[in-house]
Amino acid sequence: MNAPLAFRARRGAARFGHVLVLAAFAAFLAFPFYWMVLTTFKETKDLIDVHHNPFVFNLPPTLENLRILFEDTLFGTWIVNTLEVGVLVTIITLALAVPAGYALARLTGRWSQRLAIGIFLTYLIPPTILFIPFSRIVGDLGLQDSLWSLVLVYPSFTVPFCTWLMMGFFKSIPRDIEEAAMIDGLSRFRAFVKVVVPVSSAGILTVVIFTLTLVMQEFVYALTFITTSSHYTVSVGVPTFLVRGDVYFWGSLMGACLIVSIPVAVLYNLFVDRFVAGFTVGAVK
Amino acid sequence: MSSVAAPAPQADAKRRPNWLDDELWLGRLLIAPAVVYIVALVGFPFVLAVAYSLSDATVGSTSLDFVGLRNFAAIVDDPTFWGSLRNAVVFTLVSQALVVVLGKVLAMALYRDFRGKWLVRLLILLPWVAPISLGSIGWLWIFDPVYSIINWSARALGLFGPNTWPIWLGQPDLAMASIVMVDVWRLLPLATVIILAGLSAIPQDIHDAAQVDGAGFWRRLFMINLPLVMPIMLVALLFGIVFTFTDLIVIYVLTRGGPFDSTQVIASYAFFTGIEGGDLAGGAAISLFLFPVLVAVAILFLTVARRAEVA
């Protein structure tokens, strides 16, 4: 009589603990975004009155901060810039990483594994070491303050990661597919283009998403190379332009963070397992 | 999986003998562009960084004169550099220790199935996907000296007395604690999903068997679960170390290295010296001090990866 009750109590406690742990983590990780939402729609007068309860709207919600963001700053231009760079970098990345990933997965001698590891290790050389020489290279090429400098440099961190990702993806495709095509008379290269690439659309889409998000997040190179506000990308334009000396346009800043982050987050959530696979190939399995 | 018929036996016969040669050649051709790009845009700049560190390069001048180890000698005499190195090590170790432990706890909580998992995962991933510079700005507002929501809430809850009002980013110890907190916030999601992938790879019967044998939660955790997940936790840790040790964005946005260089790290010091100060040579020399750590991390990583592959 007593045992099941104790058992049920313990199970209830475990479930309660589980919920508590999840709630605590979610609160810590998501709170800044909740705070951004609140700040975005508050009037500045409401934000800076120390007698107001900051958790509620003491004055009616407003769209003024978003209006400032879109009309008084170049936010729209920055988004367009970011997308332009993103699309070009994605094209370069696909052109380089998809064939390289295939070669590493299939057409490989003994040197392939070393090469794969070599490519992997390049993402241990961070922008923090490279931005100083790059600032000179970009200047010598006459690309200072041009979005083309970013188009040139960003593939240096997207290509290694995406090559690794595609390699894992191609390894998971059965060899029979292209072997059948080759027996039917296609060359290896044509079998790759006509048969393997079409069935790899999920992997390619993953590369596209990650390239776009990595471009959207990049800060150091854009801060170093770009000096004119109309050439900024979002991640540099927002903090540079909406902070004037000691004056922070908090509502607009938070609005910009939200507008950029939320769509990316939703996209990312769909592909996160693949992203993790890119980090852990070789370490699991 | 035999195909019905080879339609062009002639062509087939002609190709067969060179198949292996062809494949090797094609493989090289397919991989060459990526390798060339990486060598040109990672390898070459890296060599250039080393060359700068041995020269007197500045933003203004175009000449490049070899000065030997003078820049490194200057750095060794620079107390700010040693402070930055110490801060970078403290910043990285403390935040990554927290990230690995919290990431393991969160991954175990997420491993179970429950309703609304999709939404919880989305909320938990947010810090990692938001552009770092913008996420850091969000924290700048949370740490605001006058309107800090942390202070307001703590006072409203009676945790802070009427005279307690910490200036989070303005006091050396608190500033370090604050950037550690932001770094944990940003990297915890990545560590969690990596560890979660490791947990999911453990065959369920191992757990079941242990449970049947009567092993309790802690015993199962330390004797079975942790050893099995250890390689992948190391992977998460290594990435965390690389991202944290080389990061300058959080510090650039939140404290600019202040107050009194108490949050200056190698990466941010290299940026302020090399780009904002115009001393390319000095900045390059400082940033190269990141490299030994990265090499150590890479070696560790390869060891882990190899061992996991053998197992």
Image: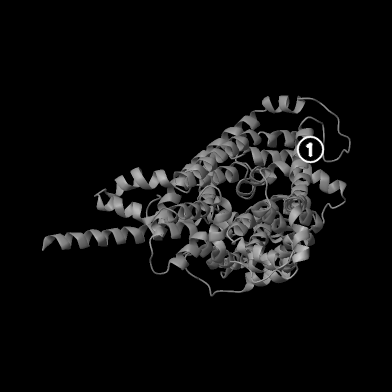
Q: How many marks?
A: 1
- Residue A268 shows up from this direction: yes
Q: Is residue B86 left or right of residue B67?
A: left
Tell whether A22 sits left or right of A219.
left
The residue located at (47%, 68%) in the rendering is: A56
Does B43 appear above or below A276? above
- Residue toward you, B201 or A67: B201
Give the residue number, with chain letter if any, for mark 1.
Answer: B48
**In the image shown, does A139 or A70 lie closer to the viewer?**
A139
Residue positioned 37% across, 54% down in the render: B158
Q: Please, which chain is the residue tagged with disc 1 on?
A: B
**Colour scheme shown:** one colour
Q: Depth check: B196 or A264 in front?
A: B196
Q: Counting other residues with Cα less than 10 Å from the Cα at mark 1, is it few (<14), some (14-19), or many (20 or more)?
A: some
Image x and y of residue A11, in percent: 25, 60
Q: State whether residue B171 appears in this view.
A: no
Residue A168 in the image: state x and y as whole percent: 60, 55
Q: Which residue is drawn at 54% across and 53% down?
A: B186
Picture coordinates of residue A208 (x, y %)? Answer: 67, 63
Percent across and percent down for residue A174 are 59, 62
- Kindly indicate the quadrant of the structure image that contains residue B263: top right
Amino acid type of the residue that numbered disc 1 sits on in the rendered structure: Leu
Looking at the image, is A82 positioned above or below residue A283? below
